Amino acid sequence: MSVIFNRRSVRHFLSKKIDQDKLERILRAGFEAPSAHNRRPWEFLVATSQEDREAIAAMSPYAKMLGGAAAAITVCVNLGIGCVDNPGDTWWIQDLSAATENILLQIVEEGLGGVWLGWYPDEDRIRAFSGRFGLPPHILPFSVVALGYAAKTPEPAFRFDAGKVYYGAYGRKNDGAAEYKKI
C-alpha cells in the first residue's frame, strides 16, 4: 500500500535515461489492469526520443514537462476491441483509467516519478497526436504519462476525508469511525 500513498504527480525530471527493463515492467503493469468483459482494449505507444516528447508537449498546454521527461507512455484504446458489441459502449474509459493508474503505481515502484496527462476526450489533442504518430481511426489516445527520474518529489498529501464517507445510505455516518491518522 505504500506505493499508493507515496504516488504523487511529478513534473520535474533529471536528465537520465530509463533502463529498458524498468520500462518493460511499467508496461507489464498496464497490461495487468482489470477490464470490463476482459476485453483489454488498450495499446501503448512509448516515446523516448526528445523530438517525439517535444511534439507531444506542443499538443497540450499542460504537457510542457514532457520535454524534460525521459519517456512518455500513451495509453490508447482500440475501439475495435473496446466497443465490439456497441459503438456507444464506453466501459473502455474505465479500463484505460485502470491501466493508466497501474502504470503510475509501477513507476513509483521502479523509483521513478510520473504524471498523468489527460488526452481523451479533447478532440484537438486526439487529432494532433493521431496525425503525428499515424494512429488508425479505431485507435484513440486516452492518456499520456510523462515519466523519468524525479528532480523533486512532492511530499505525500494524506487526502483521506472521513466527511465524504457514508455507511448504508448517502449522508449516514458511522458514529464509531476513527478519525484519519497517518498510516
Image (tube, rainbow, N blue to C red):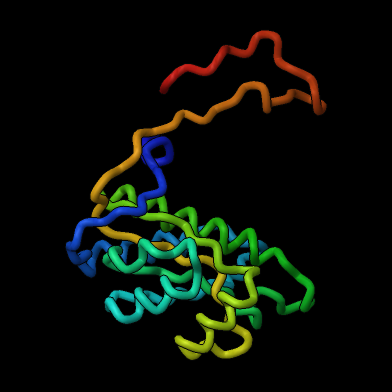
Q: Please provide percent x and percent y for residue 151.
A: 23, 50
153 left or right of 94? left
Q: Please provide percent x and percent y for residue 86.
A: 79, 76
Q: Please provide percent x and percent y for residue 98.
A: 54, 56
Give the answer, above or below, for where 173 lies relative to 45.
Answer: above
Q: Tell how many labels.
A: 0
Q: Judge whether residue 113 can be spotted in this image.
A: yes
Give the answer, above or below, for where 170 lies relative to 175.
Answer: below
Could you say which quadrant of the image residue 172 lies in? top right
46 left or right of 70? right
Q: Judge whether residue 28 can be spotted in this image.
A: no
Q: Check the image and name the residue furthest to the left.
A: 16
Q: Check the image and name the residue furthest to the top.
A: 176
Q: Please provide percent x and percent y for residue 101.
A: 48, 53
Could you say which quadrant of the image residue 115 lies in? bottom left
Give the answer, above or below, for where 163 lies relative to 33.
Answer: above
Residue shown at 37% from the left, 55% from the top: 114
Residue shown at 26% from the left, 56% from the top: 13
Residue shown at 32% from the left, 62% from the top: 25
| Residue nearest the observer in this picture, 100 or 68 | 68
| Residue nearest the observer in this picture, 116 or 81 | 116
Q: Quadrant of the N terminus?
A: top left
Q: Quadrant of the C terminus?
A: top left
